Amino acid sequence: MRSGSPFPSRLTASRTRRCARALAATALTLGVLAYASVASAGAETYRIDPDQSSTEFAVTNLGTARQRGHFGHTEGTIVLDSEEHTGDVNLVIDATSVDTGWGLRDAWLRGEDMFDVVHFPVMRFNSTQLVFKQDELIGISGLLTLRNVTRPVNLKIEHMQCGREPDGRRETCGAGAVSTIKRSDFGLTRVLGWVSDDIDLTFQVTAFRVPAGDTRAAVPR
């Protein structure tokens, strides 16, 4: 004989409501994940080509003459999402590749008095914020590490152009950025009376877009 009790139907209704709420929550979660996936789809990663990139510097010597030099090996990655105005820039500069055109001076710059490349063979720049004007990247704030000292640095983007190579094979970006730092902030205090404290930096980079799934994009930190 069947019971006329209302409890089984109420229990079924309660389970139905719980299932409905669970399905709704699952749908909401999947929707959020799908939106996040679409939102991040615009980010593009570029690998900096060290053969076509360099970091240049200029200082004032004896209060009048300008002395210029460069670091011959610069590598890194650039991640840009122009629509979301986000991204990340990481540069690794080989301090041992310093070149001013005079071997004796270059040897001194590599020594303990200056870059001390035996203990600090690389310099690093890691962005903390990218500044956009509409969809154009115009500035980068970040941290520069030199001789194991890290200081905030702002870069001004002088030019940036992206497109395909003439043969259409690869997407590429070329960019130039400038900044001025004080070498004394990084412990480079030798011959301050002879050579200026201010160092003008110029980064000239060529970078190629990394295909999806290429795990070689990462740069050592």
Image (cartoon, helix red, strand yellow):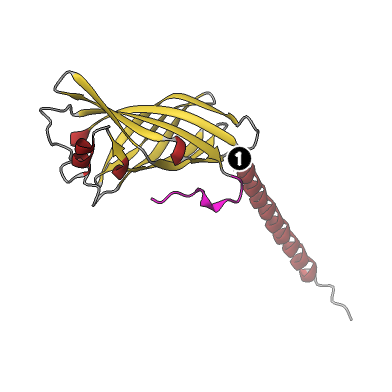
Q: Which contiguous range is marked in magenta?
A: 211-221
Residue 94 position in % (x across, y down):
34, 44
Crowd around label 1: few <14 · some 14–19 · many ≥20 (10 Å): few
Give the camera-side residue of 89 and 175. 175
Give the camera-side residue of 97 and 152. 97
The quarter of the image holding the N terminus is: bottom right
In this rendering, does residue 84 appear at all? Answer: no
**Local SS, label 1:** helix
Quadrant for residue 97, please give it: top left
Residue 109 position in % (x across, y down):
21, 39
In this rendering, does residue 177 appear at all? Answer: yes
Left or right position of 207 against 60: right
**Total count of labels:** 1
Q: Residue furthest left?
A: 193
- Magenta span: helix, strand or loop, mainly? loop
Residue 115 position in % (x across, y down):
22, 42
Left or right position of 209 against 15: left
Residue 88 vs 179, above or below: the answer is: below
Residue 123 among those drawn in magenta: no
Q: What residue is rendered at 62% in x and 41% in y?
A: 41
Residue 53 position in % (x across, y down):
43, 35
Q: Residue furthest right?
A: 1
Residue 215 among those drawn in magenta: yes
Quadrant for residue 187, please give it: top left
- For label 1, the residue is 39
Q: Residue furthest bottom?
A: 1
Q: What residue is rendered at 21% in x and 46% in y?
A: 116
Q: What residue is rendered at 63% in x and 47% in y?
A: 32
The amino acid sitting under disc 1 is Ala
